[in-house]
Image (spheres, grey):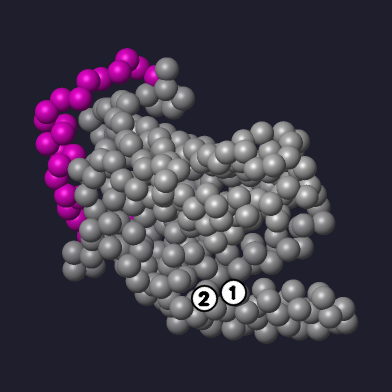
Amino acid sequence: MSRFKFFEEEQVNIVDDHKTKLNKKAEPKISEPVLLKYRCEQTVATKLNNVITNHATTKREFHIKNIIDNGSLIVEVSLVDNIIKINPTHLSEAMDLFSSLDLIKCNVKVLVDQETGKIKKILNYSEVLNSWENFKALLKERYSFLRSSGAEIELKKFIYLAEAQIKDEKILIEDIHTKLFFDLFFDRYLVNLSEVYKPFTLGYNSQLFEGISVPLHISSEIVFEKPLFVELKKQSKIDVNEVDISTIKKKYDQKFQPIVGYKFSSYDFQYQVRQIINTELSLIEETDVFIMEEVKNNVEVIVDYKLRRIE
């Protein structure tokens, strides 16, 4: 039985006329903006030797405005609620900094790529830059009391890395897409419904090992269909020959083995998605995501993410 209550009725077989509908491009049918509201809840837990060492929960509400302008899809995104709780609590201040930074990155007006459904251009990029400059000035003023050279260096490093990211529009777009809401909302279904059930490869940034990108081969399966909705199940597999295991092992030896004690075993990455798409309006109704990255029996990070349209 599906986890989604909306689809608790009996499974419907795929029929030719619905596939014909999916094979049509998502044509602009609206002259006025479509207003949407989404809520997201994310839990991230890291385990060492099967013991949770840190745990964070995030709740966010996004307001979306979809606009058709001369055949192009423009989307305005506003992050209106951003609630984060983290344990251990000594990490809270650092998390607050990243949360404030997200308020700059996530309030954007973007042009959607008509082929991929991803973000092609940030139309209010100058506003984003101005917001960053104001935030940077406030940050320097807020921490002007710092006397410890170590703390001052960390602050300067944070500002340097954030600025390098924000002041390059291409890099900023890539970073925005690493956030699950943006990765899920801006996708192929926005521009071409025929693509939603086709396999694809996703490059996913490792949560355990900085600088490592993991190629995930995603297969999609249609689970349920109704006249206006389709439920999809997506699962991933990794090919170890495509993953830089030697670099991962070196990073593990430096970062985790001194704490865990045990030698590097084997690496795995799982990515599972269940998603309901409104095929009439080309929008997401709800999505559940499960991500697990691990060095087996030694260290793992688990992400549980739920996205729901509330209006």
Quick check: 246 left or right of 114? right
Q: Amino acid at mark 2?
A: Ile
Quick check: 225 left or right of 210? left
Looking at the image, is 307 positioned above or below residue 102? above
Mark 2, Cα crowd under 10 Å, few <14 / some 14-19 / many 20+, is: many
Looking at the image, is 86 positioned above or below residue 197? below
Question: In this figure, which residue is indicated by the disc labeled 2?
Answer: 166
Q: Position of residue 102 (x, y in %)?
A: 58, 64
Cβ atoms under marks 1 and 2 closer than 8 Å: yes
Indicate whether residue 31 is drawn in magenta.
yes
Can residue 311 be seen here? The reply is no
**To which quarter of the image does residue 151 belong?**
bottom right
- In the image, which residues are magenta? 8-35
Q: Quadrant of the C terminus?
A: top left
Name the residue at the top extreme: 10
Name the residue at the right extreme: 147
Identify which residue, 20 or 301, lies in the foreground: 301
Q: Position of residue 8 (x, y in %)?
A: 39, 19
Indicate whether residue 109 is drawn in magenta.
no
Prevalent SS, magenta region: loop
Name the residue located 69 percent from the left edge and 47 percent from the top edge.
Answer: 56
Q: How many marks?
A: 2
Name the residue located 82 percent from the left edge and 76 percent from the top edge.
Answer: 150
Looking at the image, is 169 positioned above or below residue 203? below
Marks 1/2: CA–CA distance: 6 Å
Mark 1, Cα crowd under 10 Å, few <14 / some 14-19 / many 20+, is: some
Question: In this figure, which residue is indicated by the disc labeled 1?
Answer: 162
Quick check: 294 left or right of 16? right
Q: Amino acid at mark 1?
A: Ala
